[in-house]
Amino acid sequence: MRIAAILLAGVLFAGCSAASLPQGTPGGSAVATPSGSPSSESTSTAQPSSAQAPTCSAEAASLSLAEQVGQLVMVGVNVELSAAQRAAIREHHLGSAIVMGATPGGVKQVAALTAKLDALGGDTGMLVAADQEGGLVQRLKGPGFATIPSAAQQARLSDSRLAARASGWGEQLVQAGVTLDLAPVADVVPSRYQATNQPIARLGRGYGSDPKTVSAKVAAFSEGIHAAGAAVAVKHFPGLGAVSGNTDFAATVVDRTTTASSARLRPFRDAVADGADAVMVSSARYIKIDPDNLAMFSPTVIGLLREWGFDRVVVSDDLGAAAAVGSVPAAERAVRFVRAGGDLALTVDVTTAGPMASGLRKAAEADPQLASRVAESATRVLALKASLGLYRCG
C-alpha cells in the first residue's frame, strides 16, 4: 500500500517535475563557474545547430518594465479559466501559461482555452505549455490526444520510430494551440539509483542509465516535436537522476556526485548543440557544482548552460507549490531566478504569480543591473514566441 501511495502521489505532482498539481490544488553566493568541458566519457559528437532564433531586442526594449516582467512569468491555468487566472494574466501582463488540471474535452476543449489565452496575451501573444512526456506524466488527455507511453517504454523504440511517433504527439499539441512541450526528460539515472530515485526512475520518466542512449532518445523525441511545429524544454538540468527525494514533496533534495564535467550531463549538452528551444533547471542542490544554491537560483548552474553556448530560454522548475522553494517568500522567487540568469519563471499556483511578478518588477526598478537582465530575458522569450509564429520581430 505504501508503494502504491507513493506512485499515486507521483502521478498527481510529477511534471516539471512539480508542475502537475491536480485541478483545484492551491498552491547566497555562488562558487566560481567550473569548466564546462565534459569528461572523455561524455564527449558529444553533436554539432551546434545552424538554426538561429529571431532577434527581438528592439521589441523587448519597447515594452514597459512591467510588460517585460510579464514575459518572464508562466502561470498555471485550468481548461475552465478561473477569474483569478484571468486577473493575474491581465494585471501583470503575463505572457505564458501552463495547462493544469483535467482535460476531459480533449483537443477541442484545450483549443478553446488557448484561444482565450491568446486574446488575453495581447500584442505579445501567449506561449502555452504542457507537461506532455508520456506515461504517468501526460497532462493533456481526452479525445484527440493519443495515450503516450512512458519514457521507459519509449526507450525501447528505435530512434526513427520514436521521432515519428513524437511528431504525431506534437501535431496534437499544435492542434490544441499548445506550442511548448515541457519534455523530454534528459535525466540519466545511474543503475545504483534505479530502485531509490523517486522523481524519475520510480515514475518511469527516464530513458535509462547510459548517457549516450538517453541523448539519442532525447534527440529523437525533440526531432518529432519540432517536425510538428512545436518547441521543447529539455529537463531537469543538471539532472535529477542521482537523487532520492522529489523536490515536489521534499524541502531538501541534494545531489552529491554530479559535477560540471559529469558524463550524466551529456544529454543536456547534446540537446543544446542540437538546438533545444528551452532548458528547464531543477530545484535540487548540487554539492559539487554549487553547494550554496538550489540549481535554479544558481548563477553557476545556469552559467554552465551559457558557457556551452546556449542563448535560448532557461525555464525554472515549479516556483509555486514545490516544497523545495517553500521557505523562499513568493516575492523573491522570480528575483532570485532571474538574477541567476534564468528567463522564464514557472508557477503552477496562480496565487504566487502576482507576488512573483510584482516582486521582480519592484526589484528591477531599484536595480539597473537587474532591469537589464529582465530586458535580456524578455528578448529571449519573445524570440521563442517569434520562432513559433506567435509574435513577430523585426
Image (cartoon, grey):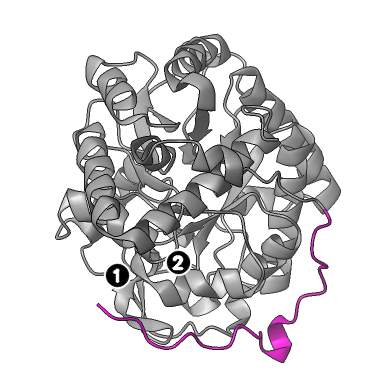
In-image side of 54 versus 81 (left or right): right
200 in magenta: no
Q: Amino acid at mark 1?
A: Val
Can you say whether 40 is above or below 237 in the image?
Answer: below
- Work out which quarter of the rendered image holds the C terminus and state it: top right
- Mark 1 element type: loop
Instruction: Specify the segment rendered in magenta.
Output: 27-50
Graded by Cα atoms within 10 Å as few (under 14), some (14 to 19) or many (20 or more), the crowding at tag 1 reads many
> Closer to the camera, 382 or 10?
382
Q: Does the CB distance between marks 2 and 1 fall below 8 Å?
A: yes
How far across and down, in percent of the image, does residue 72 sit?
41, 44
Kind of residue at badge 2: Leu
Quadrant of residue 80 within the rendered picture: top left
Instruction: Report if residue 149 is visible in the image.
Output: no
Give the class, few, some or many, for how many residues have Cα within 10 Å of label 2's Cα (few <14, many ≥20): many
Residue 322: image x %, image y %?
A: 26, 51
**Residue indicated by mark 2:** 240
Q: Is residue 307 left or right of residue 248?
A: right
| Residue 27 horizontal/vertical position (percent) | 20, 38
Residue 272 seen in the figure: yes
As drawn, the label of residue 284 is none
Residue at 19% across, 49% down: 330
| Residue lying at 47% horizontally and 41% vertically, measured from the top left | 137
